[in-house]
Amino acid sequence: MPVSASNPLAPSSLDGKRALVTGSSRGIGADTATYFAEAGARVVINYRNKEKRALQLVDKLAAAGGTAIAVGADLTDRSAVEAMMDRVREEWGGLDILVLNASGGMESGVEADYALKLNRDAQVGVLDAALPLLSQGSRVVFVTSHQAHFIETTPTMPEYEPVARSKRAGEDALRARIAELQDKGVGFVVVSGDMIEGTVTATLLDRARPGAIDERKAAAGRLYNVSEFAAEVALAAVEPLPADNTRLVGDVSSFTD
């Protein structure tokens, strides 16, 4: 390969590994999946309704010598999630890396409890469905934001608070499974970062609160872009687990003072 500009993973370091990244037809998920594929992993590109983008990414990775499949699944639909895992089992027999990247809740026209359904209930549902495919040495990575991770102690923008609280609820629900995962030999890590420039969430937040991203950038000094943050997510899947199962990306002084 390579396809990406700066992959943090060594070539061939994931040879033989199998990875599923939820919400990976674009953004952080797509870049994370690309890093995995470049390092030799077989990758599932999961999408909800962006099939064309998912297939384009699969073709791009294949053209560069990687192996990937696109599997559509609305993560709030348990039967769709089960079908996705059945496809993984049929294709590859199991999983070594599961990245829970998909999230949402700021979209227009969704039901009032959609954020909680996606950011908490669906995350647990995907883990439940994937658990039979995971084995000794596998890794589960949950992707979140500082605004959600620290929401109990540091207020966030009102427009983002419902999403932040739903993501924190998802993190808590997954953390409650750590002992179970450890018994199975599966590692678990949360990757938390500040607002990421170029993501759908950042775009929607800036639309709801004009200037929000510039304000946050001024307060933080700098914000990671999509590829930079995806590199941290990819590393979290392979590096030794932090003692508290948490990888904090970038400056957190605004959240811990």
Image (tube, grey):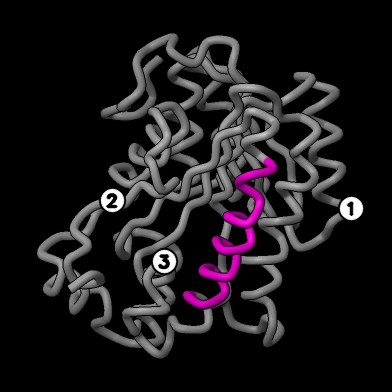
Residue 177 at x, y percent in the picture: 66, 50
Say which of 48 and 222 sits in front. 222
Residue 181 at x, y percent in the picture: 66, 39
Please tell me the numbered disc located at residue 249. 2
Choose top left, top right, bottom left or bottom right for residue 213.
bottom left
Residue beneath disc 3: 149
**Separation of disc 2 and disc 3 at Cα?**
12 Å
Residue type indicated by callout 3: His
| Magenta segment | 164-180
Residue 36 at x, y percent in the picture: 48, 26
In magenta segment, residue 134: no
Residue beneath disc 1: 79
230 relative to 220, above or below: above
SS at mark 1?
helix
SS at mark 2?
strand
Q: Residue furthest bottom?
A: 158
Disc on the earlier residue, 2 or 1: 1
* Residue in the picture at 86% in, 42% down: 83
**Separation of disc 2 and disc 1 at Cα?**
34 Å
Choose top left, top right, bottom left or bottom right for residue 68.
top right
User: Which is more foreground, mark 3 or mark 1?
Assistant: 3
Residue 209 at x, y percent in the picture: 34, 87
